[in-house]
Image (tube, rainbow, N blue to C red):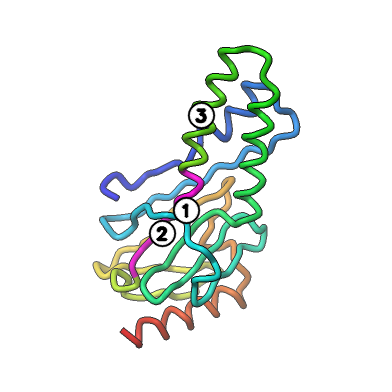
Amino acid sequence: MRTPSTAIALFALVALPALFSAPSAQATSFTCSARGDYVHWSDRCDPGDARLAITSEDDQVMLLITDRDVVMQLSNRTLHRVRRELRDAGREQNNVLAAAIVTAVAGTVRALLESSFVCHVSDLRDVTYEDGRLVFTGRNGRQVFGNVHVDDTDVTAAFSERDARRFVREFHRVQAGR
């Protein structure tokens, strides 16, 4: 990712409910700033294919590790909620222009929701749990996934200590097997 600041549907998910009168909708934003070329977009990972999948304490984000990758994506629960809200927002439009805008934005958002932030295990020097948060260190010694937020919550600090430590142990097992 050459330009590391990425906002997944920040405008769409925050503005859509407000602009098109979906009073029950809950806006969600997912942002990630990562350094260098280590983090990239990929298709959403099936948690069943992971060696370990943990979910943040607020059930917004999943962190997965496979034999090859560390994957960060919206949780299944959040994904289903946002999909439902997008569908409902499209149905509620009486104005043709508003409906067209909602349809265009919703299509883009759906495509982004089916994606994940991915970093190859081989691009990470270490993963540790320090001061209540996961710390991902790249081969270059710089922090990877250093600024990931969902709804202003630091994702690296959003997992229970028990789950975070399990993730660190599993990372070390994967790394040792390489």
Helix, strand or loop at disc 1?
strand
Q: Residues within 10 Å of mark 3 (few under 14, many from 20)?
A: some
Which segment did they paint magenta?
112-120
- Residue 57 picture quarter: bottom right
- Asked if labels 1 and 2 touch by Cβ distance under 8 angstroms, the answer is yes
Helix, strand or loop at disc 3?
helix
- Residue 97 picture quarter: top right
Q: Residues within 10 Å of mark 1 (few under 14, many from 20)?
A: many
Helix, strand or loop at disc 2?
loop
Direction from residue 118 to residue 45 in the image, left or right: right
The image position of residue 155, as x and y in percent, is 53, 58
The image position of residue 17, as x and y in percent, is 64, 29
The image position of residue 178, as x and y in percent, is 30, 84
Residue for badge 1? 148
The image position of residue 6, as x and y in percent, is 40, 43
Q: Which mark is residue 50?
A: none
